[in-house]
Image: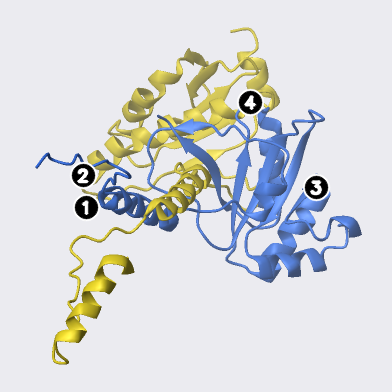
Chain colours: A blue, B yellow
Amino acid sequence: MPKIKKKRMGFVIDMTPLVDITFLLLTFFMFTAKFKSQAESEQKFVIERPKVSADTSKVPDRDVAIIKIAVDSVTNDTTYYFEVTNEADRAQVWGMSKSIPEELKAKAQLPVNLDMLSELVGNTKRVRNETQFAIDADKKLRFKWISDAMDVLRKNYATKFNYVTEKKQ
Amino acid sequence: MAGGGGQLKVERQKRGKASNRKKMKRVGFHLDMTPLVDITFLLLTFFMFTTTMATPQVMEMSVPPEKTEIEVGESKLLTILVREDNKIFYFHGSEDPSEIELKNIKGLAERENLKPEVINELITALKPSDEADYGIVVSILDELNLAEIAITAEVVKKVDKEGNPMERERRFTIAPMNEEEIAKIKDL
């Protein structure tokens, strides 16, 4: 009897190892993922932070108020921005500060001048005294911008603060 | 599926009631995993692209509360100035300033802080010009922080007057340059 050749219709690859490793990577990335904050997604600038050698201290996770000094990518103006990470505190601070224009009240981070900055820093300290302050500035800026911001912090008795930096590769 | 088996079943039923239906053994069964893999890869790529690996770091700073003047012995003061063109100068007390390269600051700080007569008492004052780059100021701070490791290691070995081991107490301040200092380094 002649052998009947079997026609290979569909052929199957075992995908189990592939699925295993993909799920492993997926869970890893899902747990490590940290999403952009509302303030970060609103901003129209990129801050090129100064690079420093390895230091283990990280930006605190909670109750931080960040003074950002950045060059707007559209208008090329340098501006101060103020952000409070704790949402409940932010609502209170924004509510207390009279100098904020109505249309900006919904924003997570505000473009400010030095007088507004001083009021906001003072109110932030009033709402939560242990809030930590950080200055996040572009490395190409003149030091004047930073020293003015430091003066504002000093006048509001926030004598301890942080410079936000990036690790040198 | 029912074709061949069905006929066989009918024949058997004619023969006797007791005979059971012959069960087909399922040997290898395949599940189509393609959609699963598709969606998993999609999610994987999404998370890979949205995640940020390099979280920013911080450098701690502290400034004196208000503009307070503190009397300091001149021998205990090391001043580092940064000029508008980002050139760095240093001097002790009221000596004449001399230029220094960024990479030599660490060595300078270690040397000065470990001098036996001022050990643990030296005050470092960093005075950047308003026109200097913020980047260079942070680089100097970084160098000073690096020097701190060696200084601390050395200081804790020493004992103070009462015989207790010393603790490193860092004295550092950041301030704007005054007129006198601007004039001093103007033509260097």
Asked if marks 3 and 2 touch (Cβ < 8 Å), the reply is no
- The residue type indicated by label 1 comes to Pro
Residue B72 visible? The answer is no
Q: Residues at marks 4 and 2, common chain? A: no
Residue A158 in the image: state x and y as whole percent: 62, 56
Q: Which residue matches tag 4?
A: A140
Report how far apart the C-alphas of labels 1 and 2 lie in the structure.
Answer: 6 Å
Report how far apart the C-alphas of labels 3 and 4 lie in the structure.
Answer: 20 Å
Q: Which mark is residue B158?
A: 2
First in sequence: mark 3 or mark 4?
A: 3
- The residue type indicated by label 4 comes to Lys
Q: Secondary structure at mark 4?
A: loop
Residue situated in front as seen by the camera: B43 or A169: B43
Q: Which residue matches tag 1?
A: B165
Residue situated in front as seen by the camera: A6 or B115: A6
Q: Nearer the viewer, mark 1 or mark 4?
A: 4
Subunit of mark 1?
B
Subunit of mark 3?
A
Asked if marks 4 and 2 touch (Cβ < 8 Å), the reply is no
Asked if marks 1 and 2 touch (Cβ < 8 Å), the reply is yes
